[in-house]
Every structure is written in C-alpha cells, then in structure tokens.
Image (cartoon, rainbow, N blue to C red):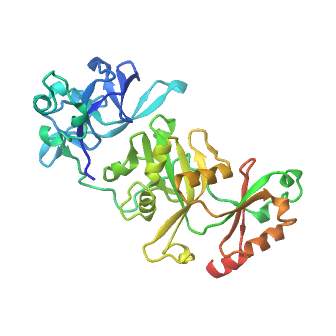
Amino acid sequence: YVRKLVTIREIDSVKHFSKALNLANIGGWTTLVKKSMNFRANEHVLYFEVDSFVPSHIMDKNAFCIPASVVTFNGIKGYRVATHIAKAGVGRSLRHVFTQGQILRIDQFPEVEEYIAQEATDDNGKVDYGFLSPIDLAPMIGVLKWEENTSLPPGTNFKTPSFVMKTDLERVENCPNLFKKKKYTIHKFQETIKVDGATMTCYFVLNTSPKLSDLPPIQPSHHREAVQPNGRFGVCSKNCDLITWEKSNYWLTALGQEIHKKLSAYGKSIAIQGELVGWDIQRNFYGYNKGEYDYFVFSITDIDCGTRWDPKQTELWCQEQGIKHVPVLGYYPITAIASRHQDLVDRAELKPGEGHVYKNCFDNRAFKVLSKWYIMRHG
C-alpha cells in the first residue's frame, strides 16, 4: 500500500465553522478552508493529505487556516500538512473539530491543468474525473512524504484519556447485600470467565466529538493508523495512552485484528476495553506460542455520554464486528445460581481460570469472584 498524497477530489459539502472559516468535507475527511476562498460543494480541488511536505514555492503560508511554520526537509524549505484540533465558540457553544489535510484550487497548478487537458478531457471539453481520482499528483508538483527525523524516547507515553473508565472490580466478599436485597432475585447478571491478561483499551473518537481535546499529540510515525477519515483511534494500557506502536504488543494486536478499521466503520465515539493475553503475559496461562497475542473485550463505553453499554449489548456488538468477547457463561439472577457468597466462590473453582465476573444488566454494577486455586498456582 502506497499513500496518495495529492489527489483530485470533489468537495461533498461546505459548512460554516467560524466568522472567517468553513469546514469542507471531502470523502469523509474534514478540513478548514477560508471563507474568502469561496469553495463550494461539488467543486473539484487538489486535496493534500496529512504528512504531505509542500515546498514553500508551491504553497504560501497564508494558504493555511492554522498558522504554519517553515520547516526544512531533505534540504528543502516548506510546510508540513498536519492534523490540528480547531476550536470555535466559547462556553457551552465551544466546538472542537479535527482538521485534516489541505485543499487548493486546480488552477493554481498549470502543470496539473495541462495534464487534465491532455489526458482526461474529451473533444467536448468534458473532464473524466473518475479517471483522475486514483492518480497521485504529488510527484508532478513536487510534494514529498514527510518523515519525522526524531522520535520520542522509548517509554514516553501519556496518561489515559479521562473518558477511559477504570476497570477495577470489587470482590464478591465486599458485597454484603448480594443475598439480602430483593433486587438481586430479579436483576439478571452476565456471568463471564475472568480472563487473566493485561488491561487494554482501544478507543475511537469522532472528529465532531468534544473529547478530541483530551487526546495526546499524534506521533507522525503512526498517523496512518491513528488518524482515520472520520476520527482518531488510540490504544491504551491500564495507565498509559500508548502514543507509538512500534514494538508495542498492544498496538500490533489491535492493528492485526483491524480494530482501528472496525471502530472507524462503526462511526461512533466508543472505547472498548478488554484483556490482552499472550505468550509473555501473566505466565502464559493460556499456552500461546512465542510471539502470539489475542484480545478479549469485556466492556464498551459511550465516550460522549460517559456511560457503559449494557453487557448483553456489548456481547452482541462484538459478535457483529468479529471481535472476541470474554467467554460468557450465561445470564441469570444471582439467586438462581447461588444462595450465599461461598456458592459463587465454589462455582469459580469449577472451571480453569482466574475466576468469574458478574455484571448487573440493569445498572452495570459488577463484581469479581476469584478462584483461590488459580491464585495459589499463578499468583
């Protein structure tokens, strides 16, 4: 796969953003444009993707809606097309949006106009834009692929975004009312195997979400994975937002299962949380071969609402998306399977593993029951 840095695209829509700026939508991407440029829907333009390096003789700094600084790349002075978070309004009307890429008019590039006239225009003057759309025009006009010259030191990460909910669970021993209150005879619980791995969260935040401002800067080395046409994808360990994917088993597992593509295609701001398991995690209880990893989801959060999905909804969604869910043993009131705390502890000993997790399908409250057998042998 080779990225096409500069292509001819049709503007899908142009919407107001601020007093001086509009938002142009192009094939799922959103970029800021100056109102003074009078871009219109259905107009064909040159679209410069993120990480295009544009020599200064091609593009003036005034073309950028967000101020750009001159940088030197391969001995050439120019500008890097980057991703930005743009803000408009104040107070409750404050809005945030990802602006990705840059658009310019075709008539600013005589060589492109000449190419269109010779290769894609019929005798009646009609342009075949279908023929032109897959062609990368970057080499023709001198645009290069920006490559970062430096990288962050190993281990440099950020704290998990505020919308990533804690996954710690109360032990059944600390739930004294479990067999006292009537509601536990009515409310159904989801019973699952407690998978023993490393906590891993994959999030996707839409470009239109106010939560974009919670996210850390994007490393240029993984723009393609983190920046999707309609939002931002990220991967977290229990305590860190992992900003680089090289040599990260978390990122490599997510990309290998195409979770970034699946969340983008789903088109909502959600965070899926689960367990990363593999050959060098928690003494490899599950017997993976060297270098093998897997991911099992146990919870999904609506990022903008700040609420967790119903456990059953989470299971069904994972089935639809082809993403593994932690093994589900059933759905029933607690009193249908136990009459005291010890019954649940004994139940956890019946199957190999760390134990069981119980989630209330009514209010999402959850607790865990650990297998003493497992703890004694695996710590």
| Residue for point 42% across, 73% down | 291
Q: Is residue 173 above or below residue 96?
A: below
**Coordinates of residue 24 in the picture (x, y in percent):** 35, 27
Between 307 and 14, the one lying in front of the other is 14
Residue found farthest to the front: 123
Between 289 and 367, the one lying in front of the other is 289
Q: How many marks?
A: 0
**Coordinates of residue 282 in the picture (x, y in percent):** 55, 74
Q: Is residue 176 visible?
A: no
**Coordinates of residue 332 in the picture (x, y in percent):** 79, 57
Between 271 and 127, the one lying in front of the other is 127
Residue 171 lies left or right of residue 144; in this view the side is right
For residue 370, which quarter of the picture?
bottom right
**Coordinates of residue 191 in the picture (x, y in percent):** 72, 61
For residue 46, which quarter of the picture?
top left
Between 4 and 216, the one lying in front of the other is 4
Q: Quadrant of the C terminus?
A: bottom right
| Residue for point 50% across, 35% down | 210
Q: Is residue 278 visible?
A: yes
| Residue for point 84% across, 54% down | 184
Residue 249 lies left or right of residue 173; in this view the side is left
